[in-house]
Amino acid sequence: MLNRVSTYLYHHPRVVLGLLLGPPLVYMGVVYLGSLFNLLMYSFYYLEEFTGLIVKEFTLSTYAKLFEPANRDIFIRTTIMAAAVTFADALIAFPLAYYTAKFASPRLKTWLVIAITIPLWSSYLVRVYAWKLILAQEGILSWFINLLHLDGVLEWLLSFESIGGSSLALSPIGLFIVFVYIWLPYMILPIQTSLERVPKSLLEASSDLGAKPLQTFRTVILPLAFPGVVAGSIFTFSLTLGDFIAPIALGNSKFFIGMAVYSYQGTAGNIPLAAAMTMGPIVIMIVYLLIARKLGAFDAL
Amino acid sequence: MTNSTPAIKFENVSRHFGEVKAVDQANLEIRDGEFFSMLGPSGSGKTTCLRMIAGFDRPTSGQIFLYGQDVSDLPPYERDVNTVFQDYALFPHMNVADNIAYGLMVKKVEKSERMRRAEEMLDLVRLPGYGKRKPSQLSGGQRQRVALARALINHPKVLLLDEPLGALDLKLRQQMQVELKSIQQRVGITFIFVTHDQEEALTMSDRIAVFNEGKIVQVGTPAEIYERPASPFVAGFVGTSNLISGNLAKRLTGSDKTFTIRPEKIHLSSLETKPDTGMLSLDGIVRDVVYLGLFTRYLVEAEGGADLVVVEQNLKTTSMDVMSAKGQKVRLFWHKDHINPVGGE
């Protein structure tokens, strides 16, 4: 009996494919896309302000609310933060990934990869609150900055209205530092993977043909690692766009998209507005991916 | 054209990786304009020597001279030497023309001039009009030609080739051997060719250095290497060779040194045949017969204990005839000039 099943499956690879792909496709289709579609539906409903009830009638009025100054600022603030975090992560991640991929001995490489991923094993929440302590007025970072006699610089930075605050923990700068830290592994690993796929002989060929190290970096390494940078930036950008825990714990309590969604659907009970807000990052990400494709980030895939 | 200064000179060059002596006290002179092969099994140090000439590796001790200039510590981008890599190492994100013109681009040569010269190189390697393609759209043989064109565009003083034909099939390899040789003669550049394929080295080279275990064991023309191998290793590695030593050697030649005789120099005949003058003979029993189409290979257990490989062309015989030789007693003949002591007289 079992033999006949095996023989049947061997001769019908499509059936095997169907059996293998069926469950995850059903899951994706129903649970994942279904809930997304549901969310989309709700974004076209609206909240009756007076009764606090959701009216299930098609309307664009909820979307119109997104363009009110307060909500528009949330989008701008979040997008700038996501872009800044992505840029900083790419700058920090590249040398680390390059060293890990191309120079570290196999043993050291294992340890480096473990060191990079270890933070991911601990609770995200714990790490955010740990940073709150590090960044606090009496925290270790302030102590260290005082030690270097740079407290003047810190105060000067914190005095800017848009990025500053009463302490690092309560300023957008602090939030930025924490975002950069938290999403860094998601940037390092894709860049490292893309660099590992570049054979050493390409770098040797480049220098053999007369390119100095900086030229080799610009004309060979960077273009070939670019898809990795884009892959990493998709993580860091979208994770920052949607995060709500870090902005709640840190910063000057000005709203970010995730935070706004969280509060609209929670205390305010305005699920249509929360849903419409969620569409924001999706649209931003689609635009982002289109730009990335235009830049040729996916050509090498 | 020819220059009396050697293109490449090794002076007591060693390269150690920890305990491993990849190259050990190598001394070598490669002449200007020569097609020079470095031949040896894998791990014999030939590729390490090539990498040290290119500048990817630095000698642990000793000096390397490029036309009289000590280049031992120069980085690759400051040496007038270019390389054709074993895996071709074409840049996947550039098209063929940009790959070929890469050496000009890093020298900041103007774009139109770059493209003109890339097209010239494409003509040289017989791939006209392929400039716009991506390396991934080319066959192995075509990639090989692009790699060659890219390495030649800067007119290097020396071109290094690291087993460039290894990945090609037999037909294409033979065709490329001829073509490489003709390109070398046209451009007049010193070629240094690394290979583990003895036939390839014999076909193409003006001279060959045979490597074994980090040492250069013999340098000479193909004929010298083949006819007068300097050691049992060379005799065995370059072609097939029969070794005769001890009592048997003494009986045949009067000396108990080790001698070599090539399989194709030995003739097989019946026991009734008498040797002509100048011929040596030895009786034996055919233990194995391998029919190879063009020729047949016999394994003969000769009296005195030596196992000799004999190769005979299949001029008149068919496979049926040759197979029946197995187990028969035969007499082996060869001219006494064809048995040579290993390591010279």
Image (cartoon, rainbow, N blue to C red):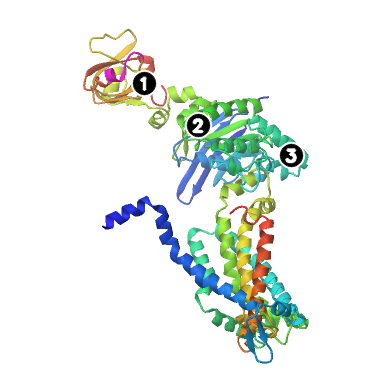
Q: Are marks 3 and 2 in contact (CB under 8 Å)?
A: no
Eyeballing the image, is A99 above or below A154? above
**Label 2 amino acid?**
Ala
Q: Secondary structure at mark 1?
A: strand
Eyeballing the image, is B146 above or below A287? above
Q: Are marks 3 and 2 on the same chain?
A: yes
Residue B153 image point, x, y percent: 68, 36
Q: CA distance from mark 3 to mark 2?
A: 37 Å
Q: CA distance from mark 1 to mark 2?
A: 29 Å
Q: Earlier in the sequence, mark 3 or mark 2?
A: 3
Residue A105 image point, x, y percent: 51, 58
Q: Which mark is residue B310?
A: none
Q: Earlier in the sequence, mark 1 or mark 2?
A: 2
Task: Count residues near mark 3 (Cα–Cα under 10 Å), then give few for <14, some for 14-19, many for 20+.
Answer: many
- Residue hosting label 1: B295
- Residue hosting label 2: B209
For mark 2, name the chain. Answer: B
Q: Which of labels 3 and 2 is toward the front?
A: 3
Which image quarter: residue B191? top right
For mark 3, name the chain. Answer: B
